[in-house]
Every structure is written in structure tokens, then in C-alpha cells.
Amino acid sequence: MRQPQDLRGALGELLNDGEVNGVVRPEIAASWSRSIASDLHPDRFDVPYEAEGADNDRLIGAAQPIVRRLADDLASTSMSLLVADKRGHVVARSVDDGRLRSRLDGIMLAPGFLYRENCIGTNAIGTALEERAPSVVVGTEHFADALTEMACAAVPIFDPATGSVLGAIDLTCSAREAHSLMLALVKHAAHEVEQQLVRANPEADRLLLERFVGARRHTRGPLVGLSGQAMYTNARAAKLLRGPDRSALWEFVSAGLVNRSAAWLELPTFFEGSWSVACEAIVDGGDVVGALLRFQARPTPHDPAAGIDRRTRRPTFGWESLNENELSLAELIVDGLSNREAAARLFVSHHTIDFHLRQIYQKLGIHSRVDLARIAIEHGAIAM
């Protein structure tokens, strides 16, 4: 176990020498470095305050029912539940323990205050927002001396339609009360908030958004969800858009899906570059009400790799050798899902999961889930 004095000593070395030793988790060391680059100092703690803006209504509306339910579950514990917007601005707090409430007030972890990483240094809310990934910070892993007696776990909340970060949900307690289940609880809470955001959409749009959100979790390339009323894109697809007319694009895609549940289409006029697009129909009551579009770039005649199967260029060993299906499975396994739970999530049999997991272990030269989690974290693919 890392000793507090070791971590503070490592922070001192980073401040003085610009180097950090191996007692510090890589994600904490990276956050400390960003904190120093923001001209912060461990012995100075000044938390900015801003009046609440009106642009958080959607986040607050979706988070409120989850916060109320979890607050009831946490009423007998020394845990606090907080929601912050995308800037680290705390917009909601629930804490039943009076002593903990006083401690939170003392460090200004309360509505209206900004817990952005570049304002106060390493903390779960600010670091989760900065990394766009779950974050756990315990005791002396915090950058500011004022926070070293606290522990926190936070998970970003993503806009289901755009994939952009809306905010984060966080559990904070005394470092002595820290528990390994804190992260699992806020992960589940963040997922519930995102589901609330989906349900808040109009009925006609909900099916498309639900299918788009489900597909986005397992799609690393450009992805578009499209209907006659709406269009959703992940980050990679957004970079390709030239601002096409949605209705014209839908007319083109829906015509290609007549009497078919799926089709390959060529859409060079709608997106930057030249793409082959796999279109999957979304059907409701026998009618095509939307489509999912997955993109694959077509090599140009001047591309020296034209005609070469991309798979032949993939390494055969190590993390980079894993294909998209294997990476998706690795994320689920590291998140704690059993083989059967992963099979249900990916809509395949558990025998298929067993096979792919053996392939992953063979490619990485490992024999356990613990080793898989270690390698995933080392490659920055999955946050702790």
C-alpha cells in the first residue's frame, strides 16, 4: 500500500525536479503535472465561486431523481453525493452526515464552487472531466494539501446525442472511509443519468437515440444515427460533416433501405473524403423510422496501402493487436462484468465470450483478469 509520506514526497520531487517516481499511479502523476502547468501550488487553496448558470437545467433535471434515490440509500453512511457541470461547477450536493457536511463546507465542496482541475489541482471531479474518464483520488493523491484527508470517485456524464461531456457525478468521503465500491456506484449512477437524458427526448425520437447510444458504446469509427426528424453523431463522425442537409441525407439513406434491413451506400457528397457506409435500418411497427450509419474509408488510387487488408498490418501480439471487438470485451471485463454478463451486453453467447477472452489472453501473454486490468490501465485505455 502506498504510504501518504511517500506520495507527498513524490509530489515534492515532481515540483523540484520535474520527475515523479513509481509510487504514483500514472493518471495521478499526469494530473499533478497538469496542476503544476496551471501554476498551482499544494499549499495554496483558493476555490472560485460562480453563481449558477441557466445552462445546466437539462443536466440537473436528469440527475435529480437519481440523486434523490441514491441520497436515501446513502443516508446511513458517511458519504456525500455531488453533481458538477462540464466546467466542474458544483450544481447539487446531498450529504446526511453533519460532520462530513462541515468538512465539505470547509473545503468549499458545495454548490456554486468550481472544482475544475486547473483551479484546485488533482481531484476526482476535475480530473474525470479533464480525462473524460472515471477517476478515483484518495488522500494524499490530491494535489492540494487541503484535500489530503478526503477520498473521492467521479464519473463523467455524457450527452447521449453528441457524446460531449455534460458534467460528472461524484462520491466524496473521508479518506479513512474510502471503499473500493465507490467507483462502481458512481459509474452506475452516471449511466442512469444518461438514460434519463434519453427518456427526456420526444417519443418519436427516443428509439433512434436509444439505438444510437447502444451502438456508440461498441463503435470506434464514425457513427451517425439518422431519421427524418433528427441526426446524432459521435465525435469522429462530427469531424467528417461538412454541414449536410439532414433531410437530403435521410432521403438518400431511406431510399437505399427500401425493402432492406441493411445496405452499403457510397456517400462522397455528404462527408469529407470518400466513404463506404454500412446502413442499418431502425424499424418500428414494420416501418423504417431511422438508420445507423457506420463509416469505412475507401483507399484512394494514390494510397500505397490501397487494396491491402488493414488486418494484415495489425501487430500479432500486444495491446495494439487487439481488434475492436476484443477491445470492447476488454473494457467490459475490466469493468467487472462476468463472461455471461458481457455476453448479454454484447448480444452473443457466453461461449463466444470465452473464445474471445482466450484470444485476448494469448495476444497479451497473460492469464488473469487482474493482468488484463493492469495492461489496460498502463495503455491509458481504461481509467481506474
Image (cartoon, helix red, strand yellow):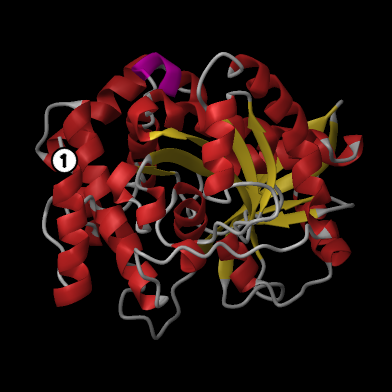
- Residue 7 or residue 334, whichever sits in front: 7
Can the viewer see residue 322?
no
Report the amino acid beneath label 1: Arg
Based on the picture, tell me whether residue 340 belongs to the magenta stretch.
Answer: yes
Residue at 40%, 72% in the rendered image: 40
Give the quarter of the figure containing the N terminus.
top left
Give the quarter of the figure containing the C terminus.
top left
| The image quarter in which residue 250 lies | bottom right
Can the viewer see residue 247?
yes
The part of the chain drawn in magenta is: 338-342
Residue at 76%, 37% in the rendered image: 62
> Going by the picture, which residue comes out furthest to the bottom?
302
| The image quarter in which residue 93 lies | top right
Residue 59 sits above or below residue 297 on the image: above
Percent position (x, y) of residue 253? 76, 55
On the rendered structure, is 348 left or right of 274?
Answer: left
Based on the picture, tell me whether residue 259 belongs to the magenta stretch.
Answer: no
- Residue 119 or residue 125, whichever sits in front: 119
On the rendered structure, is 255 left or right of 210?
Answer: right
On the rendered structure, is 43 left or right of 95?
Answer: left
Residue 293 sits above or below residue 138 on the image: below
Percent position (x, y) of residue 303? 37, 81
- Residue 123 or residue 166, whichever sits in front: 123
Residue 383 sits above or below residue 267 on the image: above
Residue at 44%, 73% in the rendered image: 299
Residue at 35%, 18% in the rendered image: 339
Tell me the SS state at disc 1. loop
Percent position (x, y) of residue 147? 41, 49
The residue to which callout 1 is attached is 2
- Residue 257 or residue 56, whichever sits in front: 56
Q: Main secondary structure of the magenta part?
A: helix
Percent position (x, y) of residue 344? 49, 19
